[in-house]
Image: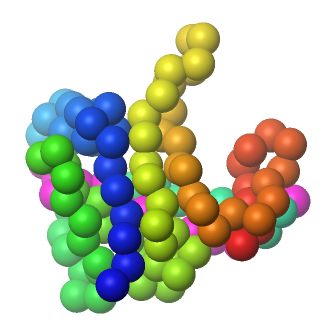
Amino acid sequence: MAQFSITPAAAQQIRQALDERGHGLGLRVTVKPSGCSGYSYVLDFADQEASNDVAFEEHGARVFVAPEALTMLDGSEVDYVSEGLNRFFRFNNPNVKDQCGCGESFTV
């Protein structure tokens, strides 16, 4: 069984974004070929649960992972961090072997 965890900070941000938006079930995460290292994370709102999504729930927030991304994301943790004026979701992914200098793409 695949594992994926959501930090309290990420859960709070997901809930807040859904509240501001007025609808949605959670955050949808997948990966796509991109960047100089191979893959990048793709985040979107999940308005419906696809029949093949794998759902993870923690701290009152849900994350839906596309099945084709599950192997690359297994064991990952999504966090929401602030660095200076920037705020963003950060993935702590144990499967990453290398990533580009800007952090936009990764290799598994």
Q: Does the stretch in magenta take in 33?
A: yes
Q: Main secondary structure of the magenta part?
A: strand
Whether residue 34 appears in this view of the structure is no
Q: Which residues are magenta?
A: 23-36
Residue 64 to residue 25: above or below = below
Q: Residue furthest top?
A: 84
Residue 12 to residue 85: above or below = below
Q: Does the stretch in magenta take in 32?
A: yes
- Residue nearer the viewer, 7 or 82: 7
Residue 44 position by quadrant: bottom left
What residue appears at the point 74 percent right and 56 percent down from the top-left corner? 105
State the image coordinates of residue 20 (x, y, percent, origin top left): 19, 31
What residue appears at the point 20 percent right and 74 percent down from the top-left corner? 49
- Residue nearer the viewer, 18 or 92: 92
Whether residue 54 appears in this view of the structure is yes
State the image coordinates of residue 104 (x, y, percent, origin top left): 72, 48
Residue 85 to residue 50: above or below = above
What residue appears at the point 86 percent right and 43 percent down from the top-left corner? 101
- Residue nearer the viewer, 4 or 21: 4
Colouring scheme, one of rainbow, by chain, secondary structure, one colour: rainbow
What residue appears at the point 33 percent right and 84 percent down from the top-left corner? 1
